[in-house]
Amino acid sequence: MCIATPVKIKKVEGKRAFIADGREVDISLVQNAKTGDWLLCHANLAINKVEENEAKEILKLNKMCAHQGV
């Protein structure tokens, strides 16, 4: 199963965003993405913007599931 992962934008150049872990993601599907925004990304493609609290909750749940072997 594949899931979208929340990431925070560190820098934007055109239709590319650079995120905290050094990866580059395509932001052409997300309107008005800017530095500091949180995105849901799958396979280096941003599919939606999310609020910071929502992104952090998703990351927390992902971590819990990984520890439980889900």
Image (cartoon, rainbow, N blue to C red):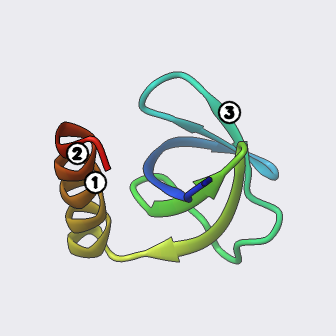
Residue 6 position by quadrant: bottom left
The residue carrying mark 3 is: 24
Asked if labels 2 and 1 touch by Cβ distance under 8 angstroms, the answer is yes
Q: Is residue 31 left or right of residue 19?
A: right
Q: Amino acid at mark 2?
A: Lys
Q: Amino acid at mark 1?
A: Leu
Residue 53 vertical position relative to residue 21 in the rendered view, above or below: below
Checking the image for residue 17, the label placed there is: none
Checking the image for residue 63, the label placed there is: 2
Determine whether the residue tagged by mark 2 lies in a helix, strand or loop.
Answer: helix
Residue 47 vertical position relative to residue 11 in the rendered view, above or below: below
Label whose residue precedes the other's in the sequence (3 or 1): 3
| C-alpha distance separating marks 3 and 1 | 19 Å
Q: Callout 2 environment at 10 Å: few (<14), some (14 to 19), or many (20+)?
A: few
Q: Residue at x 32, y 65 (%)?
A: 55
Q: Amino acid at mark 3?
A: Glu
Q: Callout 3 environment at 10 Å: few (<14), some (14 to 19), or many (20+)?
A: some
